[in-house]
Image: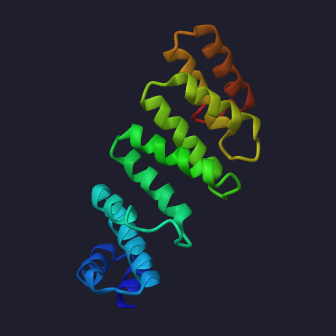
Amino acid sequence: KEALKLVEQGEYQRAAEILEPLLPNIQDATSRKRTLYVLGNSLRRQNKWDKAIEYYQQVSEDYILWDYVKLHIAESYQAQNDYQNAIVWYERFLSDHPKHPTYSFAQYQLAMCYMKAENYEAALKIYSQLIENKLSGYSRASQYQSGKAYEELGQWQQAYFTYQHVIDRNSSDSMAQ
């Protein structure tokens, strides 16, 4: 309980220091899953990506927050610039949770990973879905990123028209400039 209070206060290192020694003695399956998840979160908040992934991957798939476990694993790999593993976990998350409230966020991050992995065609497919979904919150950013993908593919005219569309939609923000 003390560790959970520390997490709520943003004291992630102290929470992890309390929970890690307790973990081997936790016999109750539900408590173990929750502890592994909280440890993963605490370490992720400290940018200790490898250790966070290690704990997250010990959480069983029947845990109530397994959807977030997958998402956090993907984010952790992405933060380490391990785009291939991030892609695997984002795709797994998206496949398993098509109605999740963070679905559009995960799609956008997956597309960004594809961009970093230089798979521009795959990124464009995702960006086009986000552009069409005006409620995603990622329509405009996806339009801009599509322009960058077209540039990388050497499709200059398509890149120009894509950027022009971004400018036409709102010429006063930093994205248009």
Residue 18, percent across and down? Answer: 27, 83
- The residue at the point 58 percent across, 10 percent down is 155
Image quarter hosting the N terminus: bottom left
State whether residue 23 is above or below residue 159: below
Residue 162, percent across and down? Answer: 66, 20
Residue 25, percent across and down? Answer: 28, 86
**Which corner quadrant of the image does residue 123 belong to?**
top right
State whether residue 81 is above or below residue 125: below
Residue 92, percent across and down? Answer: 54, 48
Report whether 150 appears left or right of 23: right
State whether residue 99 is above or below residue 29: above
Residue 42 seen in this snapshot: yes
Q: Nearer the viewer, residue 165 or 67?
A: 67
- Colour pattern of the rendering: rainbow
Report whether 60 appears left or right of 105: left
As drawn, the residue found furthest toward the bottom would be 1
